[in-house]
Amino acid sequence: MLTLSKIAKWLGIKDVPHLPVSVCVQDSKQVVKGALFFALKGERSNGLDFLEEVALRGAFAAVVPKEYDGPDFSLTLFRVDDVLQTMHQLAKLAMQEYSCEVIGITGSLGKTTTRHFLTQLLSEKFKVAYPPKNYNSQRTLPLVVLNAKGDEDFLILEMAMDRPGQISKLVDIAAPRYVILSAISLAHYFGEGSPFKTMDEVAREKACIFCDETEYAVIHSDAASFDAVREACSCDHILYPYESDLSLPFVEEQFKECLMGAIKMAEYLGLSEEEIKRKLPSLTTFERRFETTQYRGITFINDSYNASPKSCIAAFRNLPKAKGRRIGVFGAVWELGEFTLAAHRSIAREALQYVDELLCIGKPCETMVDVFKGSGKKAELFDSREALEKAMRERAKEGDVVLVKGFSSHKLWEIVPKE
């Protein structure tokens, strides 16, 4: 059990009460009684501004910069040189006391869906700890480790990055004995100021998930095509996707691929074919991943969790048939750098085959509108989410299928009508 006195001992601090920590958080809204709050500084906010709030919510303690000289609000304050570095340090020390084996998942696409499937499969037979939502960054993965009990059979961790060296830092906290490396493809790595210039550089960073402790890996064939991945992986491994005799519960190709990766790892970790078959019919997808809802006779496909060129194309290809029209409601994919124009043009050309009308938001979608209009199909670019939603509600009629897809920053899930 994590306690304030144990944390104090790890940090070399004395005279701290022996109180149990209920949860470690960096978001004041997630504080409950007994919480340990990490007062991280972000681009838009500073955790120090929320100390009074977290105290009122019942937190026992907070990790703060040593230069902080404000009130403690009756919290136990751990004053440190660097709050984020301390979070990493504590997670690493906690991991050293755990008995669970780490499964690490990285890649450009499908990390969370693969993790979600694998968690459901393994939970039938094993005790599993896993992230809430997509806690996979420098600021959130350490919290997943700290909030685990440590006596689980497996700790499943997603490992994401947007800078070189970040995967290695996460591996340093929790070295994975087992690895799933999903597809490596064009995604949000090439925005303004990005250090990545080529997909080979992205692959090299993703390949840092392999370490001396890695025993076995399941690798997407797209990822395996990169020299950096082949050079980094010296453990036993298998490739996916593959021809499967199993009756998979999804028709969407992107879900099938993620599930195949999860199945291969589950098999290696001890699930029998019968156990897997028994679990398959009850598998669910993660929120806002091709969720289907009905509203006034209109079928809405909510695939708004996030977007990359490959996932956009997959979403259009997997649209169900419609009695009426098929409408694409699309938010531009950001952080593609020099690939932006070509990527959106490619998405538009693919979308032409599957949707009758396109409603867009985000300047990079200008080229998509041009492609559609050049082919004689309706398309329009909007300058606000409110205007986009108004047009969607006006134009979608009973019998239509509406795909809502876009980069997470657009928050397009907010415009999907509730059942």
Image: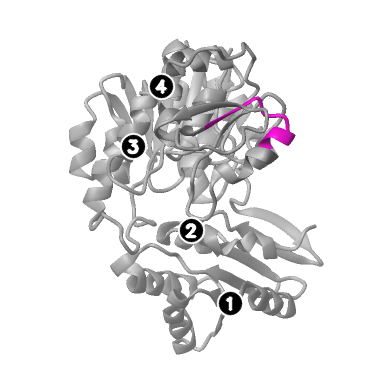
Which picture quadrant has residue 294?
bottom right
Q: Earlier in the sequence, mark 3 or mark 2?
A: 3
- Determine which quarter of the picture holds residue 326: bottom right
**398 part of magenta stretch:** no
Quarter of the image with the N terminus in it: top right
Disc on the earlier residue, 4 or 2: 4
- Mark 3 and mark 4 in contact? Answer it, CB < 8 Å: no
- The residue that appears at 68% across and 73% down in the rendered structure is 389
Could you tell me how far apart the alpha carbons at marks 3 and 2 are, in whole angstroms? 21 Å
Q: Which residue is mark 1?
A: 359
In reply to whether residue 62 is colored magenta, the answer given is yes
For the record, the magenta segment spans: 54-63
The quarter in which the C terminus is drawn is bottom right
Mark 3: secondary structure: helix
First of labels 3, 4 by sequence position: 4
| Rendered image quadrant of residue 178 | top left
Q: Which residue is mark 4?
A: 92
Q: Which residue is mark 2?
A: 307
Residue 157 visible within the image: yes
4 vs 2, front mark: 4
At x 63%, y 43%, the residue is: 50
Q: Position of residue 140 (x, y in %)?
A: 50, 37
Q: How far apart are the two marked residues, 1 and 4, measured between alpha carbons?
A: 47 Å
Q: Which residue is mark 3?
A: 167
Mark before the other along the chain sequence, 1 or 4: 4
